[in-house]
Image: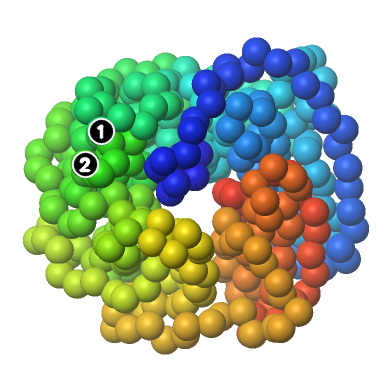
Amino acid sequence: MKRAVILPLIVLSVCSCRKEEILWQSETENKGDTVKNEIIGFYLLNEGNMGSNKATLDYYDYSTGVYHRNIYSERNPDRVQSLGDVGNDLKIYGNRLYAVINCSNLVEVMTADSAKHIGTIECPNCRYLRFKDGYGYLTSYAGPVLIDQDYKQKGYVAKFDTATLEIIDTCHVGFQPDELEIVGNRLYVANSGGYMVPNYENTVSVIDIATMQEVKRIEVVNNLHHLRVDGHNQLWVTSRGDYYNQPSRLYCIDILTETLIDSVDVAVSNLWLDGDSLYVYGTEWSYVNMDNTITYSIVNVLTHEVVNRQFITDSEVLITIPYGIMVHPVTKDIYVTDAKNYVSPGVLWSLDHNGKKKWTVRTGDIPAQFALLYK
């Protein structure tokens, strides 16, 4: 549900909670791009437009080169409901696949190898997931989808047992907490305050995992979104900006001192960390110009330098609204999704490591989150 925060003044519809019973037919398309290594495929979660109950799940099989569209209904014929309303995050932990379905107020839990339903975790307005030592940690806005500068309900992080799928503890943080990261015994949470425009939050909450207590806040800037930890004791934080005068930017926190140490002049809507290379794209909306500015960059996390300001080098690659990104850890192929107009099927672009087009495929509506499946 990224766009509910990125465009804070839009009129939001009431979220459906699987009230509709919709089935879509699974489809396959052979792209012929086979790869044989420890990664056997990837899942792609399509958000579906808010209120449409059209989140879907796709899968690409590296052993056959076949792209499978909308596999959830096919793999779960006894479940008459769709996957749900607005797919927001997708993770694999152990032998299970977890899909955060934001406006359906749940996490759908499936088998990682076949996407068959196992169970659900009920959580209001849930957002992003991380895992550690047999437990999952899930951010929740806690309250309804509502743009209100006087919003009263603070968000929280829910801790759940991955064996039982039961929530066993919670920790309140700031308003509208988004992505989170785990480093050692600390849990870091990006507070956005995105519903409270123009009164955004500007902090990263630090939680002691053992006690599930917030121990401090790190001030950054307004409207925080994504978090990534690198191999150099650094936590990278993205800000959406305020869509007027404060631009979207990338910030760096020293984990050892838990202090803000740097910023990088790139707009960031989404990102993927591959080694020391942080691949980012920005779809930066401005209410001043009433338009998006789209950029693609690579940041070296060791030097904090922008080493590439256009990693797509093929003039045939025409993307309207970049929305998801992944870099294959072995081949270094780059995958970027296009949400198009947000209400019709999107497109997945496969690029080689030089940014040249390999192939494209039609996806579900608003293709967003990737999850790599290992042997």
User: Which residue is label 2 attached to?
Assistant: 199
Q: Is residue 200 above or below residue 329?
A: above
Mark 2 or mark 1: which comes first in sequence?
A: 1
Q: Position of residue 20 (x, y in %)?
A: 70, 16
Q: Is residue 137 above or below residue 2?
A: above
Q: Position of residue 289 (x, y in %)?
A: 44, 64
- Nearest the viewer among 196 and 11 is 11
- Nearest the viewer among 184 and 26 is 26
Q: Residues within 10 Å of mark 2 (few under 14, many from 20)?
A: some
Quadrant of the image occupied by residue 268: bottom left
Q: Residues within 10 Å of mark 1 (few under 14, many from 20)?
A: some
Instruction: Mark yes or no: residue 259 visible.
Output: yes
Q: For the residues labelled 2 and 1, say whether their Cβ atoms are less than 8 Å apart.
A: yes
SS assignment at label 1: loop
Q: Position of residue 337 (x, y in %)?
A: 65, 59
SS assignment at label 2: loop
**Horizontal relation, residue 92 to residue 30: left or right:** left
Instruction: Mark yes or no: residue 256 visible.
Output: no
For image coordinates 83% across by 30% down, the residue present is: 24
The amino acid at mark 2 is Asn
**Horizontal relation, residue 53 to residue 156: left or right:** right
The amino acid at mark 1 is Gln
Q: Which mark is residue 197?
A: none
Alpha-carbon span between mark 2 and mark 1? 6 Å
Q: Is residue 346 above or below residue 278?
A: above
User: Which residue is label 1 attached to?
Assistant: 149
**Horizontal relation, residue 229 to residue 363: left or right:** left
Q: Position of residue 277 (x, y in %)?
A: 43, 75
